[in-house]
Image (cartoon, rainbow, N blue to C red):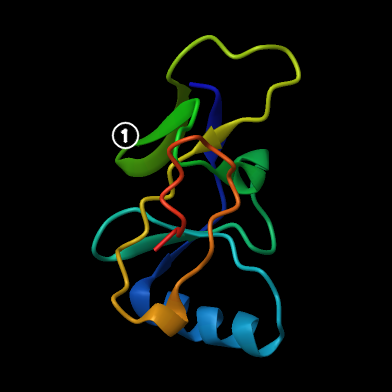
Amino acid sequence: AVLEYRGEIIGNAVADRRELAYRLEEREDYMFRVDDYTVIDATKRGSLARYVNHSCDPNCFTQIVEYSAQKKILLYSKRSIAFGEELSYDYKFAIDPDESAKIACMCGAERCRGYLN
């Protein structure tokens, strides 16, 4: 593994409240859904993995693994990564049919999808 995505482990209700609060504060959030019930919130404290950007043609991928009865999110490389090359992975956001809710993708990949969602 290249990195572990670390942060505070919270449930959906807390994640929903925090997401709204962060939005009202105009603060970026760094939340990663582990499963249907669990989210890792790395917004206020977490590992460097929270700063890994999205790419439609990433050099890394994430995998959820169970270790010591706890689910963890690990970032793995898909290929050799050159010194100084930015790490990236596909955020795989759900497709949003609402055009006004679309988040523009700025990855610059040749096969960029244009939107994160």
Where on the picture, by quarter, is residue 35? bottom left
- In depth, the one of 108 and 117 nearer the eye is 108
Q: In the rendered view, does 67 fall on the left or right side of 42?
A: left
View extreme (front): residue:
110
- Residue drawn at point x = 34 percent, y = 82 percent: 98
**To which residue does mark 1 refer?**
65
Return the x and y of residue 102 as percentages of the image width and height: 45, 72
Return the x and y of residue 10 as percentages of the image width and height: 44, 67
From the viewer's perspective, is residue 108 above or below residue 79?
below
- In depth, the one of 76 and 17 nearer the eye is 76
Mark 1: which amino acid? Answer: Val
- Residue drawn at point x = 70 percent, y = 75 percent: 27
- Residue drawn at point x = 64 percent, y = 50 percent: 46
View extreme (bottom): residue:
24
- In depth, the one of 73 and 25 nearer the eye is 25
Return the x and y of residue 114 as percentages of the image width and height: 46, 55
From the viewer's perspective, is residue 15 above or below residue 38?
below
Image quarter in which the C terminus is found: bottom left
Q: In the rendered view, does 107 fall on the left or right side of 58?
A: right
